[in-house]
């Protein structure tokens, strides 16, 4: 699977059907809808490194909370 030459490399579909990968393949994860709209306004402002760190940290925390809520309610 780890082949640099793109002519010899497996396609995504071939990789997903490979026995090693297929053991963990979950169609609902591969074909999941986007969790939300991307806000392009964030790209139009200048941020300091610290502001970016805080922004990304908050995004990760929110994602984790969403996942906890989703799976604690019995969703999958």
Image (spheres, helix red, strand yellow):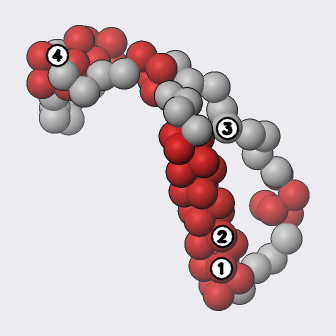
Mark 2 = which residue? 58
Q: Picture quarter containing residue 49?
A: bottom right
The residue at 60%/48% (across/down) is 69
- Counting from the top left corner in percent of width and height, residue 37 is at 78, 40
Q: Are marks 4 and 1 in contact (CB under 8 Å)?
A: no
Q: Picture quarter containing residue 35?
A: top right
Upstream in sequence: badge 2 or badge 4: 4
Q: Secondary structure at mark 3?
A: loop
Mark 1 = which residue? 54
Q: CA distance from mark 3 to mark 4?
A: 27 Å
Mark 4 = which residue? 18
Q: In the picture shown, does residue 18 fall above or below 69?
A: above
Q: In the picture shown, does residue 31 fall above or below 57?
A: above
Q: Secondary structure at mark 4?
A: loop
The residue at 60%/57% (across/down) is 65
Q: Are marks 1 and 3 in contact (CB under 8 Å)?
A: no
Mark 3 = which residue? 35
Other residues around mark 4 within 10 Å, as few (<14) / some (14–19) / many (≥20) = some
- Counting from the top left corner in percent of width and height, residue 52 is at 66, 76
The reply to whether residue 32 is in sight is: yes
Q: CA distance from mark 2 to mark 1?
A: 6 Å
Q: Along the horizontal axis of the image, is 76 left or right of 51?
A: left
Q: Nearer the viewer, residue 13 or 22?
A: 22
Q: In the picture shown, does residue 33 fall above or below 41?
A: above
- Counting from the top left corner in percent of width and height, residue 70 is at 59, 41
The reply to whether residue 11 is in sight is: no
- Counting from the top left corner in percent of width and height, residue 54 is at 65, 79
Q: Along the horizontal axis of the image, is 7 left or right of 45?
A: left
Q: Are marks 2 and 1 in contact (CB under 8 Å)?
A: yes
Q: CA distance from mark 1 to mark 3?
A: 21 Å
The residue at 65%/87% (across/down) is 50
């Amino acid at each position: 699977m780890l082949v640099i030459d793109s002519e010899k490399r497996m396609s995504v579909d071939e990789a997903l059907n490979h026995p090693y990968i297929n053991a963990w393949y979950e169609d609902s994860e591969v074909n999941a809808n986007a969790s939300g709209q991307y806000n392009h306004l964030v790209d139009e402002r200048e941020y300091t490194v610290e502001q970016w760190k805080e922004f990304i940290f908050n995004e990760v925390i929110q994602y984790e909370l969403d996942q906890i809520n989703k799976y604690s309610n019995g969703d999958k």
